[in-house]
Image (cartoon, rainbow, N blue to C red):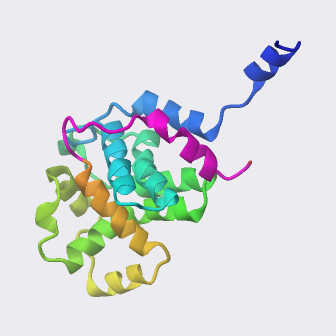
Amino acid sequence: MRLAGDHDAMTLAPPSVADDIFALFAAHGSASYGEQITVSEHCLQAAYFARGAGAPASLVLAALLHDIGHLLGAAPEDLGEWRADAQHEEIGARWLAARFPAEVTEPVRLHVPAKRYLCGTLPDYVSSLSPASIVTLRLQGGPMSAEEARQFVARPHHAAAIELRRWDDRGKQRNLTVPPLESYRRLIDTLADPL
């Protein structure tokens, strides 16, 4: 039996963090941003690989949300139009920092530096990158120097960012079946900072 006012309370409830995230994916997740799959497909694949690796919940969520900056800022889908780094990792991490702890936001912030680190420290790593990642690597500053690499490994969450980067690289497969975005609602709600 519904009590008087129950319907009004339900319609006046503010959207949750998960609702905000799902709205961003619904509005902008179909963009390809230079890869052979959409942003949504890519993020879901990265989270799938993180979960499959037994990553902690915070890192699974970071994998899911690592490219949310692409959903918040406009970047041309045609790589030929890219003239500067979009800094999607910083845009995304700032947005996420108002909603999640550092265990989620810092691997997101560091996933581009992690790519630069791996390119600077592992000679064969560059050849494993997608064509789009090679283009953006140049815009993002190229492989790290030895000094930049030393500074990177001194940062908290750098190891998690390197793991995230590996799932990011793997998550670019066409027609890979993965759990839907809605399956992450509980994880988002559990890890979101209370307002």
Q: Give residue 26's position: percent from left, percent from top.
A: 44, 28
Asked if residue 88 can be seen in this view, the reply is: yes
Count numbered badges in the picture.
0
Residue at 55%, 47% (x, y): give it: 187
Asked if residue 99 can be seen in this view, the reply is: no
Residue at 19%, 55% (x, y): give it: 135
Compared with 189, 97 (above or below) is below
Q: Which of 71 and 162 is in front in this view?
A: 162
Q: Residue furthest right?
A: 4
In the rendered image, which quarter is residue 60 located in?
A: bottom left
Q: Residue furthest front?
A: 1
Residue 11 appears left or right of 114: right
Residue at 10%, 64% (x, y): give it: 127
Q: Give residue 113's position: percent from left, percent from top.
A: 35, 68
Range drawn in magenta: 172-194
Residue 22 appears left or right of 85: right
Q: Give residue 115's position: percent from left, percent from top.
A: 28, 66
As for residue 26 lying within the magenta part, the answer is no
Q: Which of 175 and 123 is in front in this view?
A: 175
Residue 167 appears left or right of 4: left
Q: Give residue 195's position: percent from left, percent from top.
A: 74, 48
Residue 91 appears left or right of 125: right
Q: Quadrant of the N terminus?
A: top right
Residue at 22%, 80% (x, y): give it: 121
As for residue 193 lying within the magenta part, the answer is yes
Compared with 85, 4 (above or below) is above
